[in-house]
Image: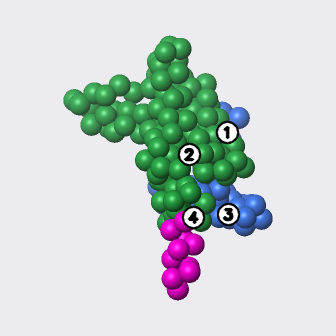
Amino acid sequence: MTTHLGVMILFAACVSAVFAVLLRDRPRDEMRLGARIFLSLVFGAYGLGWIMFAAFG
Amino acid sequence: MAETSSTVSTSVRDLPNAWLVAGLAWLVPGSGHLLLGMTRKAGILCGVLLLMMIIGLAFGGRLFPFQMSEPLVFLAAIAEWAQLGPRLVAEMAGWGRGQVVAVTYEYGNTFLIVAGLLNVLVALDAFDRARGRRQA
């Protein structure tokens, strides 16, 4: 769990849960927004990592 | 229209004092929402923010002191004090000395700082709801 990817996934899960609960009121909407934020954070960071690798690696 | 304003002002009057709600939310994450009767939200917010703090401490993160000579340390301290209750408990228990040599040291700091900053958003949300700006 202490790999960079593992910690990033854990971090993204926590942050997305808080934002989803704050920004939506119905549980179904919270779940959908939380999933969107989580996937955006994880795949955004993963994609950015590959872009940096291609540019500077 | 008059009926609508009267309904809104009555519902706002029934809510607890906004400053009390914000203060409680600062003290214990999620307690502001609990005071507003939003038990499910309060439970999730409290659980997630405390989990982030525990992960941060377990990863060897540091509870930063107010050190004016180091601006970034000073800002990190402000962010961490945004969770007053858990920060005080951790301080009194002697946790959060910071293991600089640990691989996860920076991860731990990130979790601790972000948990505090998220609690600022949580407290502001509770304040807004108590003021009637958002539906409580």
Quadrant (top left/top right/bottom left/bottom right) for the C terminus of chain B = bottom right
The kind of residue on which mark 4 rests is: Ser
Kind of element beneath mark 4 = helix
The kind of residue on which mark 2 rests is: Gly
Residue located beneath label 2 in the image: B32
Q: Quadrant of residue A28?
A: bottom right
The kind of residue on which mark 3 rests is: Asp
Compute the Cα span from label 3 to label 2. 16 Å
Residue located beneath label 1 in the image: B47
Residue drawn at point x = 56 percent, y = 45 percent: B32
> The residue marked by circle 3 belongs to what chain?
A
Q: In the orientation shown, which residue stands out farthest toward the bottom?
A: B1
Compute the Cα span from label 1 to label 2. 14 Å
Given this view, does label 4 or label 1 mark the residue nearer the observer?
A: 4
* Residue B95 at x, y percent in the picture: 52, 18
Q: Is residue B5 magenta?
A: yes
- Labels 3 and 1 within one chain: no
Q: Using the rendered image of the protein, determine whether residue A31 is visible from the camera's viewpoint.
A: yes
Q: How is the image coloured?
A: by chain
In this picture, which residue range is highlighted in magenta? B1-10
Foreground of the two, A12 or B54: B54
Residue located beneath label 4 in the image: B11
Given this view, does label 1 or label 2 mark the residue nearer the observer?
A: 2
Kind of element beneath mark 1 = helix
Residue located beneath label 3 in the image: A25
